[in-house]
Amino acid sequence: MTVDDVMSSLWRNFPTATNFTSFQSSSSARHSVARLEQPGAQFCVGDTLNVLVEMRDYRGRPKAYGGDFILARIHSPKLQASASGDVTDFRNGSYRVHFTLFWPGEVQVSVLLIHPSEAVQVLWRTAKQNYNKVAYTGTFVNGSKTEKSLCGLRLNTDKPLCEYKDEKEEEYFACIQPPTLSCSSLNTMTSYNTPGPSLTKEETQLLAQWTSSFCQTGSFLNEDAINSCLMGKRLYLKGDSTTRQWIEYLEKNLKGLTYIKPVDPFSSELAVDAHRSITVQWKNHGHPWITHHSNQVNKCPYISRGLDTLDLGGDGQDIVVIGIGQHFRAFPLEFFIHRLLNIRRAILRLQARSPQTQVFIKLENNREFSSVILRLSDWYGHMQNLAQRKVFGDLKVGLVDAWDMSVAANTFAIHPNKIVVSNEVAVALSYLCHDL
């Protein structure tokens, strides 16, 4: 599987190019219509409820093309029950939202227009081959001497470069060579947002803001059930801070699990229950990161490298959870797919030497509406999740659909609340301990 293979399979999800003329011709949630496909029908638990959406522009005229980014859910506030909907784009301005009715009683339907199709086109155009939405400052250190320099995944400059290559994985980033210090003295990097791609006034206006359905989840929401499932197991969490939430959740909810504060802030975080022989370890993924905090470059290896060096027991007690994506949204989709394919190959190598090790892929969750759209839009997260399903879909791995959970729960937070995190963990444990 290559980057081009994955991109080709996702091509049908990219918006069809249209001649954007004015904001008034873009999709308007206020003027659009949503209606039941079968009004007045009697529905039973397990039935399908379909909602038809007819998109209109700000003048009230029907749209003739698709590509709008829509999120939908059904929910019953009294029962605290909710589920996400599956959206079908007919590419003619109309959509069908498919819901499965999981519980009895009244349900409320919510259909959100996150981005009109015209905004999606802007996001797609600015995503292609654009590595400059986020830049990095590298700090080079030698003894008491410190120098700073511009770094990035791709640098458009004639100045001499320090290039940092992983030949095997074909990973790459570079820094402009500092005045006197050597390239090998690069110590930490921090990120900052650049002005980004130039947009027209109309395009800028477009980007102004406005329970698992495929498997049975066990009752892994209480301490005894979680302890019983994890007893004797070694859990390796790898990825971003949304995966780090798992170690935080387990440490707070398992009284016997003790968090061991790392001496080095860039080393793995660890929690241990010596009595039950439970070990939980979290390690962040390799560059890129989008953060104001300094990250020590040589202590944050790529996940594929980390999987190759993982010391596994070979006794079926090792579990690996991988969750990445949020820090990649500002970069072209091809770059993210390249990283996924490296992880895919590393998973296959891991499973070849330790077939009993269970691997999980935690998909991205959505994030705040206040996020900078041009860099961090949920549409980018949606496309990255489609890429993950394509890359990992044929492997023997479990998928934890954090997107489905966060849409259903209506959280819209980069770090979802405890309810979402507890269900993420519960899905993984249901794969592991389905007999409990």
Image: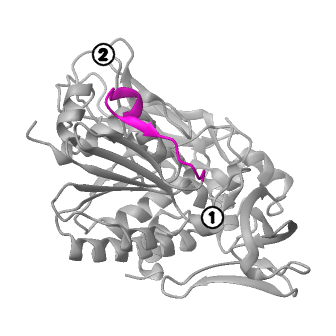
Q: Residue furthest right?
A: 179
**Is the residue 19 above or below the residue 350 in the image?**
above
Task: Give percent across and percent down for residue 351.
Answer: 24, 71
Q: Residue 304 at x, y = what percent?
A: 43, 72
Residue at 32% x, 70% y: name it: 347
Residue topped by disc 2:
106
Depicted 281 relative to depicted 42: above or below: below
Helix, strand or loop for disc 1: loop
Q: Is residue 259 magenta?
A: yes
> Residue most toward the top?
78
Q: Nearer the viewer, residue 119 or 144?
A: 144
For label 2, the SS is: loop
- Quadrant of the rendered image containing residue 62: top right
Q: Is residue 146 depicted above or below 94 in this figure? A: below
Q: Give the label on residue 381, or none.
A: none
Residue 142 at x, y percent in the picture: 80, 72
Residue visible at 43% across and 76% down in the picture: 342
**Left or right of 430: which side holds 290?**
right
* Viewer-closest of 21 and 374: 374
Sequence order check, earlier mark of 1 and 2: 2
Q: Residues within 10 Å of mark 1 (few under 14, many from 20)?
A: many
Q: Is residue 361 left or right of residue 223?
A: right
Residue 212 visible in the displayed image: no
| Residue 401 pos. (x, y %) | 36, 47
* Location of residue 148 with respect to 359 vertically, above or below: below
Q: Which residues are magenta?
A: 250-265
Viewer-nearest of discs 1 and 2: 1
Residue ID at (70%, 70%) = 131
Colour style of the rendered protein structure = one colour
Query: Which quadrant of the figure contains the N terminus?
Result: bottom left
Q: CA distance from mark 1 to mark 2?
A: 45 Å
Question: Label 1 belongs to which residue?
Answer: 288
